[in-house]
Image: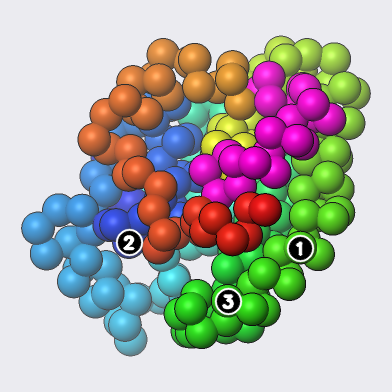
Amino acid sequence: MRYELYYWPEIQGRGEFVRLALEEAGAAYVDVARKGRGEQKMIKILGSAREKHLPYAPPFLKAGRLIIGQTANILLYLGSRHGLAPRAEAGRLWVNQLQLTIMDFVNEVHDTHHPIASALYYEDQRKEAKRYTQQFWERRPQKYLGYFERVLTASGGPYLLGRRLSYADLSLFQVVEGLRYAFPNKMKALKRKIPRVVAVHDRVAERPRIAAYLASPRRIPFNEMGIFRYYPELDK
């Protein structure tokens, strides 16, 4: 099956969690909005009044006749079909639970630069962003990444499930990579407390298909339009 991924063409954003899973799986896919008139096609689907299973927002994935929205839901679908999640129900639910926790954290990271409203520019909420980020770094990364550190300890292996890689490991890689971009100074101080999480990041980056993807033009660079944004005044 050749998948069609629909997401904004100029940012990694939430679509990147899906891209990483597709790349690790070696799945054939088209990043539709990055092709000619692909963004207009995506917007047309989002505004459709005829689509029965209409997605609310990107990312969404077309798989044959299926249209699947929401990052964690897409990964739940891809995981069991491409060996990135267990086949047994308990294992699938566990990986989905981990992914949902990651997405909760991603939402809080986004709010470091947009604490008031997504519709406002960062410059319109700079003061509030600084205050939010100060509070955020007092406890939230420690709580979330500390949780995954404990999960890795309990797993007894190099990955969240133990010996087996899952899409949640790929997503954890993306979170660490994004935080290193957005908060390089703060992450230097935190990394000593989360050695297992850092090890997962490094292990995922070395996987052949992921390494090839990261070195390719398919990987959109981090920038100040996505979830992970670097503003020096927030990293003090």
Task: Specify whether 2 is left or right of 57.
Answer: left
The location of residue 16, given as percent across then percent down, is 44, 46
Closest to the observer: 123 or 200?
Answer: 123
In this picture, which residue range is highlighted in magenta? 180-200
Residue 153 occupies quadrant: top right
Residue 185 pos. (x, y %): 65, 41
Residue tagged by mark 2? 8
Quarter of the N terminus within the rendering: top left
Q: Element under label 2?
A: loop
As helix, strand or loop, the secondary structure at mark 1 comes to helix
State the residue at coordinates (27%, 29%).
Answer: 216
Q: Amino acid at mark 3?
A: Arg
Q: Is residue 190 above or below residue 48?
A: above
Q: Which mark is residue 134?
A: 1
Q: Amino acid at mark 1?
A: Gln
- Residue 155 lies in magenta, yes or no? no
Q: Which residue is mark 3?
A: 126
